[in-house]
Image (cartoon, helix red, strand yellow):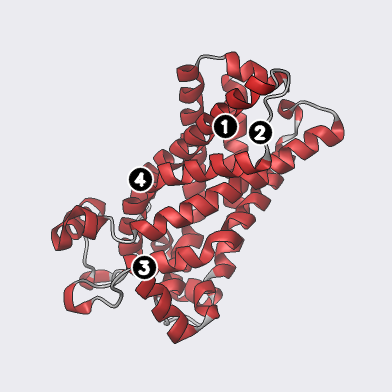
């Protein structure tokens, strides 16, 4: 309670800058830990060439070499750093707004309800989707393009230029934005809710301040929150990947998000919405653990 009240007294701009910086640090850790898992996930979602995650990883390594696991890394390294920065900045901004509202009725206890934690996370996800939509679109195009001389894009800038040239920025670069917004709102609502629930429960159970919770526990709670994030939002992610790897013009398979959902259900059934969930969950634990551990450590250092 005292921690929350102290944060309300701190300068809003100063607090937001700290949140943004800590989030950016967590975003860099997230990309470096998760990129090899992510390329396997995207390949499984968008092609039928691989029988399993292990088969996909083996073929990528054999046919394209170890560097292939970091294809398209430059875009997320810069972009995801910005995305996670926005996520944490927007989450803590929304959280403080709820705390200020709650403190009006009960100044001694501005603590959020868990519904408010979810809404704060969902707000962070929607704010983040403006950046994450085109960044992930570019990353998916680079990850799924043919290898070697047949590749379609020479790099992120060339990919942005060509995607924008097809159907314009909104229909080209921002393809799949509607389902991206749905995914981000649900995913980050659950992500932050799960993490804050476990952190608050630990502090209450052991009668300690949040800052006294060990880094090992923070990483563990962060990892579990990552599993919850993907289990709650994965079907949206599959549809997003399908739409953002789809062709243009006469090669286009899906007219819109609803058509993509319908075709996936008709052609693959419920299982089609969970393709690639194995490597995703395997990736989620270390990536989310590392993200929260780095963010919390950075915020404690800045204090």
Residue ID for mark 4: 131
Marks 2 and 4 sit apart, C-alpha to C-alpha, by: 27 Å
Q: Residue 160 got which mark? A: none
Q: Secondary structure at mark 3?
A: helix
Say whether marks 1 and 2 touch (CB < 8 Å): yes
Visible residue check, residue 85 = yes
Work out whether mark 3 precedes mark 4 in sequence or the reverse, and give the earlier one.
4
Work out whether mark 2 precedes mark 4 in sequence or the reverse, and give the earlier one.
2
Residue ID for mark 1: 95
Residue ID for mark 3: 257
Mark in front: 3 vs 4: 3
Marks 1 and 3 sit apart, C-alpha to C-alpha, by: 31 Å
Given residues 198 and 294, the one toward you in this image is 198
Q: Secondary structure at mark 1?
A: helix
Residue 87 spot, x, y in % from top left: 48, 40
Residue ID for mark 2: 112
Q: Secondary structure at mark 2?
A: loop
């Amino acid at each position: 309670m005292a921690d929350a009240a102290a944060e309300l007294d701190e300068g809003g701009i100063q607090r937001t800058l700290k949140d943004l910086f800590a989030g950016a640090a967590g975003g860099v850790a997230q990309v470096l830990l998760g990129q090899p898992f992510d390329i396997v996930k995207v390949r499984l979602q968008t092609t039928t060439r691989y029988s399993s995650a292990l088969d996909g990883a083996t073929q990528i390594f054999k046919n394209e070499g170890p560097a292939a696991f970091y294809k398209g890394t430059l875009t997320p390294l810069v972009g995801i750093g910005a995305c996670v920065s926005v996520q944490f900045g927007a989450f803590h901004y929304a959280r403080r707004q709820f705390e200020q509202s709650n403190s009006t009725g009960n100044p001694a206890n501005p603590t959020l309800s868990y519904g408010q934690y979810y809404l704060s996370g969902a707000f962070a996800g929607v704010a983040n989707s403006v950046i994450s939509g085109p960044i992930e679109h570019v990353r998916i195009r680079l990850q799924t393009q043919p290898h070697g001389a047949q590749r379609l894009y020479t790099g992120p800038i060339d990919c942005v230029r060509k995607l924008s040239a097809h159907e314009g920025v909104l229909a080209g670069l921002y393809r799949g934005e509607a389902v991206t917004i749905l995914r981000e709102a649900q995913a980050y609502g659950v992500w932050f809710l799960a993490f804050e629930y476990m952190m608050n429960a630990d502090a209450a159970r052991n009668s300690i301040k949040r800052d006294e919770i060990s880094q090992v526990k923070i990483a563990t709670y962060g990892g579990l929150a990552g599993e919850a994030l993907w289990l709650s939002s994965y079907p949206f992610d599959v549809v997003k990947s399908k739409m953002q790897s789809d062709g243009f013009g006469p090669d286009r398979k899906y007219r819109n998000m609803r058509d993509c959902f319908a075709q996936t259900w008709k052609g693959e059934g419920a299982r089609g919405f969970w393709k690639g969930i194995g490597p995703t969950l395997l990736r989620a634990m270390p990536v989310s653990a590392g993200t929260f551990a780095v963010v919390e450590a950075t915020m404690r250092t800045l204090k």
